[in-house]
Amino acid sequence: MNNFFDERKAKLEIYQKNYRGKKEEVEKLTIPDDIFIKCPHCQGLVIKDDYELKFRVCPKCQYHERLNPRERIEISCDSFEELYSDMKSVNPLDFPGYPEKLAGYRDETGEEEACVTGIGTLGEYRIALAVLNSFFMMGSMGSVVGEKITRLVEKALSERMPLLIFSASGGARMQEGIFSLMQMAKTAAALKKFSDAGLLYISVLTNPTTGGVLASFAFLGDVIIAEPGALIGFAGKRVIQQTIKQELPPNFQSAEFQLEKGFVDMVVSRGRLREVILRLLRLHEVEKWKRN
């Protein structure tokens, strides 16, 4: 035991002689700011590259972050030709501040309106595609959004193409009043003709899909798909609770709740969505794209 303490004392003396009063220069480990990002839902740190490779889906909580239309088109289509891009909303009711609000969203998003429409290719198929933009006035449906959807449905009907619509909306656009509400009937009437022709319409509900959009074209698909965790409902949860004076389930109006109640056909994660849509096109024997 004495040998142990003697040895320890000798080592301590060597340390004091050589290192006491000296500061070692330690190189600091620096981590670049753009390696990690914080999940907006669970607040967990995730590697940015992994997050992007998983199409903005958190690997920890599986939260599906909102995508803008260009990002959605990029992961859904092999090619895309935009239609009706020059259409712009006006102010039919002289709603105060509406033109300024539109101009602000155009500058912020680089889009003219809350919907991008066109013809895309997906595998061996040519499809009519519309994507709503939740970053442009919360994807609200005004007269231009309704008109673009209607024109796309009519083009798909005339060329006998399948129709694919990604919805993400807060509902009808209040600044346009009755002109906005009319779009519900207009889009539904166009889809009735499309359905009567025996053509396939796949509706994908993303976070959030609510109000007049849900009550019109979003819920009229032959096959209705929802992304996990998406908010899907007509009126807000608080409004419903105050109206019926009852507590609602914690997962009320989630995609999983709507699947359980039979309002959607399937809940599909973003990474599998393209594969599932392709399978549906094949199962319905959609005519293949004839490349020239």
Image: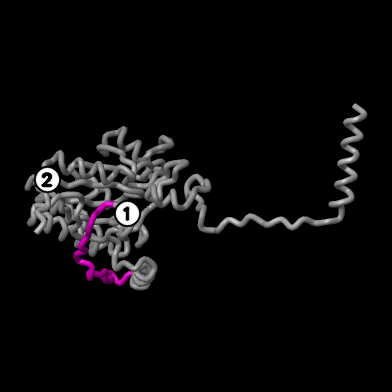
Amino acid type of the residue tagged 1 in the rendering:
Ser
Residue 275 horizontal/vertical position (percent): 25, 43
The residue segment tinted magenta is: 76-97
Q: Which class describes the residues within 10 Å of circle 2: few (<14), some (14-19), or many (20+)?
A: some
Residue closer to the observer: 21 or 9: 9
Q: Residue at x 11, y 42 (%)?
A: 285
Asked whether 118 falls inside the magenta stretch, the response is no
Amino acid type of the residue tagged 2 in the rendering:
Val
Vertical placement of residue 159 versus 279, above or below: below
Q: Quadrant of residue 141?
A: bottom left
Residue closer to the observer: 35 or 62: 35
Give the residue at mark 2: 286
**Mark seen at residue 121:** none
Residue farthest along the top direction in this orientation: 1
Residue 27 horizontal/vertical position (percent): 68, 57
**The N terminus lies in which quarter of the figure?**
top right
Give the residue at mark 1: 169
| Left or right, residue 93 beside residue 22 | left
